[in-house]
Amino acid sequence: DAGVTQSPTHLIKTRGQQVTLRCSPKSGHDTVSWYQQALGQGPQFIFQYYEEEERQRGNFPDRFSGHQFPNYSSELNVNALLLGDSALYLCASTIWRRGEGYTFGSGTRLTVV
Amino acid sequence: AQTVTQSQPEMSVQDAETVTLSCTYDTSENNYYLFWYKQPPSRQMILVIRQEAYKQQNATENRFSVNFQKAAKSFSLKISDSQLGDTAMYFCAFMKPRAYSGAGSYQLTFGKGTKLSVIP
């Protein structure tokens, strides 16, 4: 039973560029959330997707956008990258009607230079 | 808005000994979930234990147990018989369940973490 898978594992981008991160939820899960974890900090909630709609959003600018596909997989897009966007981006999935907690992936380490 | 505070940035423990990690939180909600997650160098956030606020009994998972004090808004993690594999960052997290409408449901709020080192 595959857990949450994220790609790529590492990524280096230049300021001003755009990036897309991908996530496949755990089998049977239908809800995906994205978190940003800066070095030495706890994860910060970006947004959450269920039924292909953004359901909740944290305090992140519109440069951060996402999408959920019919197979429940999800993408996180970040436009106009800033140095401060360098972080570990974690994807987590759960079952909407149960909502008892999330299973996390191993994350994508994004470095903006 | 909910806040989660972990007041111990770093802790160490000898293997086979017991250690307790502290967590306090602030919320006006009555029903919610609390979690302890472990993040080893592999980066994956691994669920250690979960507590539902309406359950008075403290959760236990093998060597891991919690002391949940709802009135004090305290949720500490006790690790018994510590092992080298327990070395990791530990995060305390709060979540409102889906039954609640409005902002914040299903959204995890994390503390800043405690770095635990198990010493051989």
Image (cartoon, coloured by chain):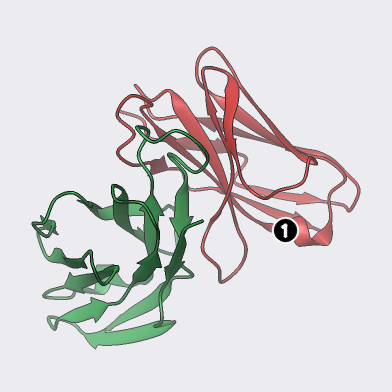
* Chain letter for the red colouring in the rendering: A
Relative to B14, does residue A108 appear above or below in the rendering? above
Q: State left or right for residue A27 relative to residue B62.
A: right
In depth, the one of B6 and A30 nearer the eye is B6
Pick the residue in front: A65 or A19: A65
Closer to us: B85 or B54:
B54
Residue appearing at x 89%, y 53% in the figure: A15
Q: Chain of mark 1?
A: A
In the image: residue A51, left or right of residue A102:
right
Q: Quadrant of the C terminus of chain A?
A: bottom right
Q: Quadrant of residue B101?
A: top left
Relative placement, left or right, of A64 versus A101 is: right
- Which residue sits at x=75%, y=56%? A85
Mark 1, residue position: A86
Disc 1 residue crowd, few under 14, some 14–19, many 20+, Cα 10 Å? many
What secondary structure is found at the residue carrying circle 1? loop
Q: Amino acid at mark 1?
A: Ser
Does any portion of residue B120 appear in the rendered image? no
**Residue B105 place in picture, x, y as percent:** 44, 40
Residue B76 placed where, x, y %? 25, 71
The colour one sees for chain B in the rendered image is green
Q: Residue at x 50, y 36 (%)?
A: B102
**Residue A38 percent coordinates (x, y):** 62, 63
Residue at 41% x, 81% y: name it.
Answer: B7
